[in-house]
Amino acid sequence: MTRRILKHIFYALIPALFPFVFGMGHAMADDITYLDISNPFIRKTPLAAPRFKLFTGSDSEKEDAEKARGILKDALDFTGYIKIIDDRSFMAEPAEDGITKKSLHFPDWTGIGAELLVTGGIKLEKDRVRLYMRLFDTVEKSLLAGKVYTGHREDIRIMVHRFCSEISLALTGKPGIFGSKIAFISKSGGNKEVYMCDFDGNNPVKITDHKNLALSPAFSSNSEWIAYTSYHRGKPDLYIRNIREKRGAIVNKEGMNISPDWHPERFELAASLSFSGDQEIYLLTGKGKIIKKVTDSWGIDVSPAFSPDGKRIAFVSNRGGSPQIYIKSLETGELRRLTFKGDYNTSPAWSPNGDRIAYVGVQNGSIDIYTIRVDGGYPVQLTKDAGDNEDPAWSPDGSMIAFTSSRENGVRRLYVMTAGGNEQRRLLKLKGSQMDPDWSMVSK
Amino acid sequence: MGKRISVHLLTALLVAGLFFTVSCGKKTVVSEPEATQVETEQGAEDTDTGMTEDEMTDAEKEKQRKLEEQRLEEQRKEEERKAAKARFVNKKIHFEFDSSELTSKAQEILKDKAEWLENNRDESVLIEGHCDERGTTEYNLALGERRAKAAKEFLVNMGISESRLSTVSFGEEKPLDPGHNPEAWAKNRRANFVIK
């Protein structure tokens, strides 16, 4: 268990910002999965997050306490599977009466419908903050997760999100989306550039400055690299760059070098190149050297998407007369057509669980996002009557999908929804138009 | 204006000179044995020398008129060349949705372009393929490339050297018409031609 948490922590955060962490109590995530977040008809679990206990009682401590609680509520609310209970219905004050199991009276919480309870304590000394966080199952009267975090005041957001990952781990068996990043394209200035933001749309930053046209950003599996297409040299070339350091590679073969997707485990990526005179999908090293040709068919072959085990690739081909999604095994070469409904199905994204593929389908002129089981079956429509909807990208835990929609005034912007298509909402507010999100797979 | 007059004077002088040379040439013909020819030529020379001053001016005016005609003809041709170039640059070919097939209208336009390329062998051309906003970014990049390549292949089959033709796709990134309606989409599904 400790090892698992440590591994998770390693992946979840930027090392330079790590506060210390201590385990406290026993999480039970290994044994029980409380929530199946891939269930499209999931019922929201009601959770209470009352005010935090103050240890020194200073004004700035109180300020930080409310800030931390706000971040906690926003993050849990964002998931789409937790319902935050209104403060006004609370019948108890753990901030005064105590935040530990022995001082809590659980019927106070089950009485208002809270199935989960998060208590917090905060101690601020100079600029160092210590957060005592606990998650309780009010029905079972048990502690599901307990952690103490210490760090700089400025890192409260990171500390709270780490506890949110603990909550997710306890409830779903997965660390969730907290701490993951979303890369996207924004035309906030005159040009399309690559941007990055937190999972919830906070802290957007521009990471390219080509002053030209950039498209299709894709995170490597460890989130250290990003690949994208840029017209920096006048035509679509593939740029592979390290996010933190100034190094990388450019694939600028004749024709187009587009639509990258990273291997889920190795420093390799798939992309569509047309130097042969025909568009085909190739497997490349992280340095841009060709390992092998994946497709071999006259016509368009584009938009590869790896399966989470890296053994198969879903892609778009018009070999059958219209753009459809196909799946090819990298081991056996076996090829299968996945989509049959409609004559325009593109942009596949393989779910992290491996069981579904999200894609864009055009039906009666309406562009929407669908999911379909990998073994085929009937597609499920997730967006409807709300502008054009494109570019689906799964969250690392498979609970959510980020996408582009023109539903507000015809301007393309980023949205998120649950994997079942519920809770559709704007991800972030930025000037201009945004598109093409890719969600980092940081949490493993 | 002054420049043009001096050009005219110069040409007039040259024409006069030419007459003189022709006369000289004719004189050499005189030495030829065939009498009839000699007579005719001689007669011709006589008419030349027998010109009145007024007649000279008329002839000159006639020459000038012809020169002016010539100049206008040149100008017309130059304008035609410019128009052909403008047509080459401005005239786009259009495609059906999700198609890179050349319509018969597109083929007509491409034949015209092939003719221009044939007449302007120093020019190289970049063919840009574009799509409408419907469909997805990456697929449209691929489709745009196929549109540009279809146009290139047609021109190569018309005898234009492949080395003069290059292609690039912009997918749906550079719409001509920013509208979200069938008219705008039709305008945006295109290949256009840029002289490099």
Image: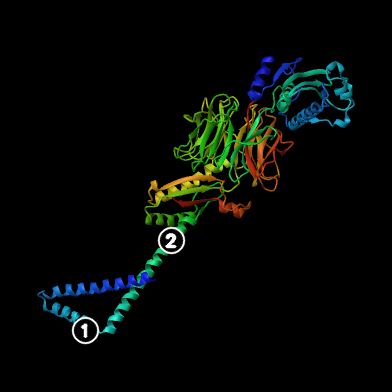
Q: Which quadrant would the C terminus of chain A be assigned to in this image?
A: top right
The image quadrant that residue A210 belongs to is top right
Q: Name the foreground residue: A248 vs A46.
A: A248
Residue at image position (43%, 60%) is: B84
Structural crowding at the residue carrying mark 2, measured as other residues with C-alpha within 10 Å and reported as few (<14), some (14–19) or many (≥20): few
The image quadrant that residue A383 belongs to is top right
Q: Is residue A243 visible from the viewing direction of this image?
A: yes
Q: Quick check: do tags 1 and 2 share a chain?
A: yes
Residue A87 percent location from the top left of the image:
85, 30
Residue B35 percent location from the top left of the image:
11, 78
Residue B51 percent location from the top left of the image:
24, 83
Q: Secondary structure at mark 1?
A: loop
Dot 1 amino acid type: Gly
Q: Is residue A444 visible from the viewing direction of this image?
A: no
In the figure, is residue A155 to the left or right of A294? Answer: right
Count of marks overlaid on the render:
2
In the figure, is residue B9 to the left or right of B90? Answer: left
Q: Which quadrant would the N terminus of chain A be assigned to in this image?
A: top right
Say which mark, if any, is on residue B82: 2
Dot 2 amino acid type: Lys
Residue A185 percent location from the top left of the image:
61, 39
Say which mark, if any, is on residue A297: none
Residue beneath disc 1 = B50
Q: What chain letter is assigned to the residue under label 1?
A: B
Structural crowding at the residue carrying mark 1, measured as other residues with C-alpha within 10 Å and reported as few (<14), some (14–19) or many (≥20): few
Q: What chain letter is assigned to the residue under label 2?
A: B
Q: Name the foreground residue: A203 vs A345.
A: A203
The image quadrant that residue A344 belongs to is top right
Q: Secondary structure at mark 2?
A: helix
